Image (cartoon, grey):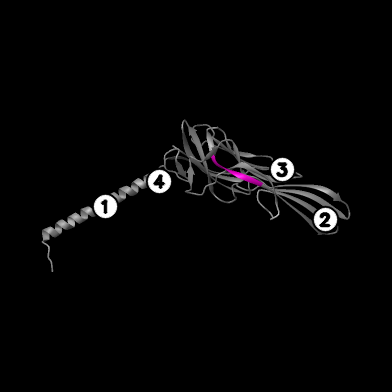
Amino acid sequence: MLHLPAVRFKHLMVMNFRSLSCFFLILITLILISCERESSPSRDGWLTAGSTIGMLVNVHDTVLVGSYHMPLSYFLDVDRNGSNDFEIISNVWGSPGMGQHPEADLVSLDPDWCFSVFNYPDTLFYHYQADTFEFSRTEIYFRNFYSCYRLGVNDSVLRVQQSQFLNLYERNQHISGNGEWAPGKIDLTMSNGYGSNVIVDNNDTLKLSETITFADCHVLPNDRILWIGICKKDSNEKRLGWIRLSMTDNYKISVLESAIQE
């Protein structure tokens, strides 16, 4: 059995300890560098939805509920410079014949402030069906559906056009500074529509022509907390940010937080 002198054994132990210490020090340094790179993206690069590192964060915690022909607005001064940057609108529009239709919009109040969007070939489909019911008299409904999605395999395509929609992000998804950005006004939701016209109405028969519109594609879904990407154009760069919100019943909007890069 080989026996090492005590002094040499102690020397080897010190060398091994120093080697392990150096290894762990290098490993920790690399991890810290990696975390710093991920948590502090440069302007014009990318941002994770919900990130607060290097951000000016505003807590709103406001519920916006408009009413019939009485829209209600909430204004956001995201960079706290005393000027409003965005307006969020909750509204219910309509008429006695059309009924009431909820609506919600996001408005950029300055052309330098934009929201993240995507362009999509939006399709309008037409679907027809006739329904007959026998009650105290015969009721016949001629139903014309216009929709952004197919309701049946035999639907006709009436139109395909390039349209712009709002990007919606889950927490920690990347908001890219190189994506599409637009100022102006954009729908958070679009309500469905209904209209009718009486063709025949007597003691024996009712014939009614109905027009029904479904326009709820690519909009903010109900009862989910999501993030909207925003940016401010400063000289030759963009300051990226986000708005955190949710919606209920297609017009009741909870504005939770907003943030912009410092």
Q: Are marks 3 and 4 in contact (CB under 8 Å)?
A: no
The reply to whether residue 59 is visible in this rendering is no
Query: The disc labelled 4 sits on which kind of residue?
Result: Glu
The reply to whether residue 234 is visible in this rendering is yes
Q: Position of residue 234 (x, y in %)?
A: 47, 32
Residue drawn at the location 81% of the way across and 50% of the way down: 208
Give the distance between the C-alpha atoms of the residues marked 2 and 4, in whole angstroms.
64 Å
Instruction: From the image, tell me which residue sits under label 1.
Output: 23
Query: The disc labelled 2 sits on which kind of residue?
Result: Glu
Q: Position of residue 83 (x, y in %)?
A: 53, 32
Instruction: From the image, tell me which residue sits under label 2.
Output: 139
Which of the 4 image quadrants contains residue 97? top right
Give the distance between the C-alpha atoms of the residues marked 2 and 3, in whole angstroms.
26 Å
Residue drawn at the location 79% of the way across and 49% of the way down: 209
What secondary structure is found at the residue carrying circle 4?
helix
The C terminus lies in quadrant: top left
Q: Nearer the viewer, mark 1 or mark 3?
A: 1
Q: What secondary structure predominates along the stretch shown in magenta?
A: strand
- Residue 117 on the magenta span: yes
Give the distance between the C-alpha atoms of the residues marked 3 and 4, in whole angstroms.
48 Å
- Residue extending furthest right? 203
Disc assigned to residue 197: none
Disc assigned to residue 94: 3
Decide: is 192 above or below 109.
below
Of residues 159 and 214, the one drawn nearer to the viewer in this rendering: 159
What secondary structure is found at the residue carrying circle 2?
strand
- Residue 206 on the magenta span: no
Q: Position of residue 19 (x, y in %)?
A: 22, 53
Which residues are drawn in magenta? 115-123
The N terminus lies in quadrant: bottom left
Residue drawn at the location 24% of the way across and 52% of the way down: 21
Disc assigned to residue 38: 4
